[in-house]
Amino acid sequence: MENKVDNSNTISTRSGHPKGLYFLFFTEMWERFSYYGMRAIFILFMTKVLLMKDADASEIYGSYTGLVYLTPLLGGYLCDKFLGNRRSIVIGGLLMAIGQFFMFFSASAGADGGVMLMWMGLTAIIIGNGFFKPNISTMVGQLYPANDRRIDSAFTIFYMGINLGAFFSPLVCGSMDFKWGFLCAGIGMLIGLVAFIWGQKKYLVSEEGKHIGLPVKKLDLKSIALIVGSIFIIFFMLNFKQMFKSNVDIISYFIYGAMILMPVLIFSDKSLSKIEIQRISVIFILAFFVIFFWGAFEQAGASLTLFADRQTERTIFGWEMPASYFQSVNPLAVIALAPLMTLVWGFLYARKLEPSSPKKMAIGLGLVAMGYVVIAIAVKGLGMGDKVSMWWLVGLYVIHTIGELCLSPIGLSMVSKLAPLRLSSLMMGTWFLANAAANKFAGTLSALIPGGEDGKGGATEFLGFQITNLYEFFILFIIMSGVAAAILFFLCSWLEKRMHNDHIEVQG
């Protein structure tokens, strides 16, 4: 497709997509470099520098990554009501850069004074993500006319930008001392922020010539108080256990409670039509199932990183590869396989055989179970001091990547198509709420890994299921994601009818 260029109204396209897509691609790439660079070394930093136990580090990891996906609710609300996408992204990027610099100071201080600095850094990153993440994703959909089928491929391209940043960040941040790794993550965020501020007026224009993401109205004092209050609440929740010497995990109550509250609030909106209610209900139902996907998938930054560090043979020609490098396998596989998956979906679409979004997600859940089958075979009979070949872990990540490509970009696109425009950012934030619950759940599950740094951590238990070794630990994920996949397959036909998208997706 060719578009005439009119500098005042329209922008040209490349490979059928507006230039704004590639501009957002670049910005998101650097933000993901920052996030995944920090994530790659975070649990190792807590266990090796702050000298925390595996279970404590896993719970903190889950709380942090969970809250990262919860705050998009706040960011989405303030964007829709006041800030607009552009200002939200600038605020979010600045806060995340500040947070990474606090992590640098935390690592510099070490076990003696680093914990409080870590809480400050995590708080800034969590709030910053809330402003940044839902708004940049929403802008991708705004670049296109309503119901444009290119939106699916646009989100897949955008997803490659995410994974390009996620690929090289562990290689950079994981190759040096922890403090310099965090510093590199902060610099990466600043690069993305400066680029966005410089190019937003030129590139953030829809194909109809409309500037997108502009402010809605001035921020009032009530909303400013909401932002400041949220910062203090998150800092308090992260510090709660340490301050009160309590075992109560209030972050779990907060996240899971929000997961229950959001459908109640949204469905109480009397302006919603019957079709809008049915479409939104599909988003919530699928959001529930992706909790099981991400709960298993996100072990990559938690238990699987500990497994890579302690029980994976990482020596190549006399050089010991850092454990964090394994987190580059998934994004590298995404970059390699995403174009192939786009071709596969296009091939099936042309023949009226393309699965609907719910079916694609069920396939993704099945593949994450299959990945754990591979690693369970590898560790069966493995002693706590023994190590397995790195290729077993690589195989798990590649299989999980194929499942991710069936689920994650399809989910973002689905929310963009099904959510009413007036609630688009809020619904995108709600979608990330499922990721919040999943990441918190992932931390809880990671804490169940038997053993420890010295191999003497002992057995753990989950819902009466005793976990005495790694084989039993990985079997838990096979059962959980496999059962979820089977149930979702059963529900697919019913969900497809409630989507009311026959003109977009082939139902079958």
Image (cartoon, rainbow, N blue to C red):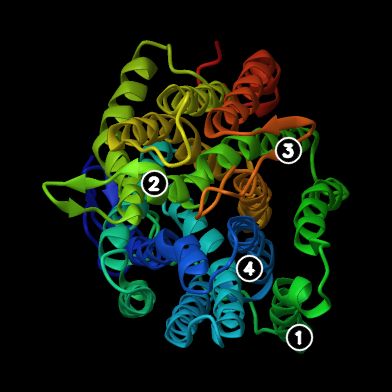
Mark 4 and mark 2 lie on one chain; the one further toward the N terminus is 4
* Helix, strand or loop under label 1: helix
The spot of residue 46 in percent (x, y) is 52, 68
Which mark sits nearer the N-terminus, 3 or 1?
A: 1
In the image, what residue type sits under mark 2?
Ala
Disc 1: which residue: 225
Indicate the secondary structure of the residue bearing disc 2. helix
User: What amino acid is found at the position of numbered circle 4 in the picture?
Assistant: Gly
In the rendered view, would you say 28 is above or below 81? above
Q: CA distance from mark 4 to mark 2?
A: 35 Å
Residue matched to label 2: 308
Query: What separation in Å lies between label 2 and label 3 (alpha carbons)?
Result: 22 Å
Q: Quadrant of the N terminus?
A: top left
Sequence order check: which comes first, mark 4 or mark 3? 4
Mark 4 lies on a secondary structure that is: helix
Residue 242: image location, x then y, percent: 74, 76
Circle nearer the viewer, 3 or 1: 3
Identify the amino acid type marked 3. Glu
The image shows residue 129, relative to residue 116, as above or below, that is above
With respect to residue 382, does 194 lie above or below?
A: below
